[in-house]
Amino acid sequence: MANLEATYIDSTAQNHSTLTNSGGGVCMMRTTWRDEQHPSFIDFISSFLSANSIRLNFVPIAPDFIFNCGGVSVAFIFLTNLDSKYLSPMFSRVQKLKGQFANLYVVIILPTKEQNDLFARSYFKYGMELGKPTFVPVQDLEMGFEKIVKIAHSRGVCKRQDAVTKLKVEKHSVQRMDLFLKVVTSIPGLDNHDANALNQAIGSVEAIAKASKEYILENTDLSADKAEIISRFFRDPKFYLGPKINRSEKQLI
């Protein structure tokens, strides 16, 4: 506890920073980790989380923290004091937890060159692999916890952005398919089933236009008559000029 008091700056003298568009979330703190910390540091953590709309729960969990921001869970080990006496159990714990949590980070306070050197020597001595998990060295307690929250927040943001991107891609795919169906079914005698068969077997309107009657028969379940109509439609002006196809729609497919 004395070591923590020496490295911790009273949070009442600091301004609590907030994350842009944090979106809130939940933080679970390991109860035994909480009991090992100075009360003023726990107050800082509580205030910092509250300022970022993150709810704090005290739970008997294996990691020191588990955050859920934006639908993704991220686990953290927060090492507030590197002691040479406890290196072996510390690295054993890291090895154990990395097999239990897909998203695990180890935030470690290394305020002096001596501690940095001790950590560097111990890292490979105890068989750690680079990036498995990621170790994040910091200089003090506040910086360490802020780093934890920023990592959890950024992982949540990335997941939300991935979800939005997927929705946009899906929406665009639906729009393209709607246009494809509209163009292909404007060919005399073709329906949605025929259009889907052509899309799966041949592809775009451009590819269908280049396909021969024989190729269409070999790769789809369309009848010979329909294959003949498709072939003539893209080659014979009498067929091409019959249906009124929006040329701008065709270019989008």
Image (cartoon, rainbow, N blue to C red):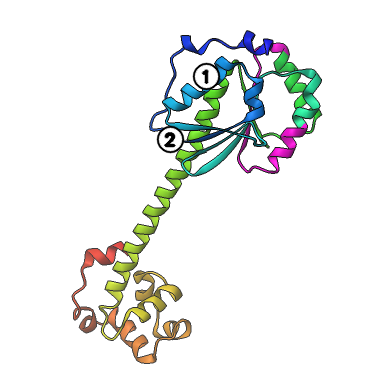
The residue at the point 39 percent across, 58 percent down is 170
Front position in the image: 79 or 161: 79
Task: Pinpoint residue 59: horizontal percent, then vertical percent.
Answer: 60, 35
Task: Pinpoint residue 60: horizontal percent, then vertical percent.
Answer: 65, 35
- Taking the image as shown, residue 240 lies to the left or right of residue 105, namely left
Location of residue 136 with respect to 4 vertically, above or below:
below
Q: How many marks?
A: 2
Q: Residues within 10 Å of mark 2 (few under 14, many from 20)?
A: some
Front position in the image: 193 or 155: 155
Rendered image quadrant of residue 100: top right
Q: Secondary structure at mark 1?
A: helix
Q: Is residue 58 covered in magenta?
A: no
Front position in the image: 186 or 125: 125
Residue 128 seen by the camera = no
Q: Which residue is mark 2?
A: 24
Q: Which residue is mark 1?
A: 43
Residue 178 seen by the camera = yes
Q: Quadrant of the C terminus?
A: bottom left
Rendered image quadrant of residue 143: top right
- Taking the image as shown, residue 134 lies to the left or right of residue 96, namely left
Q: Earlier in the sequence, mark 2 or mark 1?
A: 2
Task: Pinpoint residue 90: horizontal percent, then vertical percent.
Answer: 75, 28
Disc 2 to disc 1, C-alpha distance: 19 Å
Specify the amino acid type for callout 1: Asp
Q: Is residue 101 covered in magenta?
A: yes
Residue interval drawn in magenta: 92-114
Q: Quadrant of the N terminus?
A: top right
Location of residue 167 with respect to 211 vertically, above or below:
above
Task: Pinpoint residue 182: horizontal percent, then vertical percent.
Answer: 27, 72
Q: Which mark is residue 167?
A: none
- Taking the image as shown, residue 196 lies to the left or right of residue 60, namely left
